[in-house]
Image (cartoon, rainbow, N blue to C red):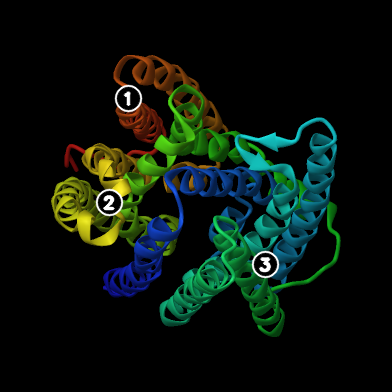
Amino acid sequence: MQVVKNSFIYLGSSILNKMIPFLLLPILTKYLSPKEYGILSIYFIAITLYSAFIGMAMHTNISKNFFNTSRDELSLYMGNIVIILSINTLLYFIVTLVISSFKDSLFSIPLNWIYLIPIISFFLMLNELNTTILRNEGKSYLFGIIEVGNSAIKMVLTIIFLVIFSFGWKSQVLGTFIGAMLFAVVAVIYMNIRGFIKLNFCKDKIKSILHLSMPLIPHVLGSMVIAMSDRLFIERMVSIEMVGIYSVGYMFGMVVMIFTDAFIKAWSPWFYKSLASITKTRKKKIVKYTYIYIVGVFILAFIISLISQLILPYFVDKKFYGASEFILWIAIGYAIQGVYKIFFPYLVHLNKTSFLAVSTTVAALLNLLFNYIFIKEFGAIGAAYATILSFGISALLVFWYQNKNCDMSWNFRW
């Protein structure tokens, strides 16, 4: 089955891709203090935040339309996505300039370094468009080369800036900026050569893109709140040093996401293609593989947690050993998020992304409340508890809505 083959390829490239940050951990934790590592963690949260607003999950339009539109029409979609992306980047860069006139720093980040964030986000989103095309084309090997190559260049540049030039936490920011820029250029060249970009402004395509993507903004933003607000609460309620320690534990726990992402990258094109001409046999396959995936993800979370506890002392400096208490809880949280991911494509297929905005917003608001209550009661570990509960609520809501609107017979009653 092609989806299984591609899953292994995506898994291999994802493991190699995510191994690179782990290979950086011994170096980063040696040269950076917990405070500096905390600032770096907050900085990448800010990049993800900007990317949610600038990118608006517009790559979803590619997956939705790839198998049911002509190449010319798809290239028109792509061209108008790039136009929207460029306008958004300019808009949020101006917003950043305005903010900088009122504040000197934002969540411990010097504002003069925040100017790079919308630009980095723009480059990352261009690369996201390209890799989405590659996945839908089934070019998993080329996808892996680009994904791993991007991370490898960022790692090498980070080491150079950190070890040779002693730029501190800014080293990884600069490495990410340069790497993202290089691969954005590669993305544009590839998409243009393959005829995937037609820069003709089309009002109808703009409306279609925004109709699907606008509801995904609160969805993506809500997902980010669930996944990242914990560190912002820790920074305010505990300390920036604890953010650094927590973030190291988070990196180990979220290894689960490497496997869920790899599977979903292979699953989504096959899933959308199957639903385009659904049969009882295909429904049975989808349900069967979904159950196997869910069980496997939770087993994987416990295995990864156990292994991580054993290898942590060999990967990080001793001032970060306190990260071990967070690993299991973060791993369970990302197993639950993996369950959410398997049901997300149904709502895109049904064009019901507006419900994603509602469900994720509800879960995100509860997450803010849970973070405050649990961190106040239990300390930094409370943030991990809040993450588990919020991912669970989000997954349950999406499954309930999918089950209500798309009959897949999860009880195997055919």
Point out the image quarter for the N terminus. bottom left
Q: Is residue 377 above or below residue 119?
A: above
The residue singled out by tag 3 in the image is: 74
- Residue type pointed to by label 3: Leu
Q: Residue at x 44, y 25 (%)?
A: 363
Q: Could you tell whether 248 is left or right of 358 in the image? A: left
- Residue type pointed to by label 1: Gly
Which marked residue is nearer to the observer: mark 1 or mark 3? Answer: 1
Q: Could you tell whether 264 is left or right of 87 in the image? A: left
Distance between mark 1 and mark 3 Cα atoms: 46 Å
Question: Is residue 129 visible from the viewing direction of this image?
Answer: no
Distance between mark 2 and mark 3 Cα atoms: 52 Å
Compare residues 275 and 157 and report the one nearer the observer: 157
The residue singled out by tag 1 in the image is: 382
The residue tagged with tag 1: helix, strand or loop? helix
Compare residues 290 and 380 and report the one nearer the observer: 380
The residue tagged with tag 2: helix, strand or loop? helix
Q: Could you tell whether 20 is left or right of 131 in the image? A: left
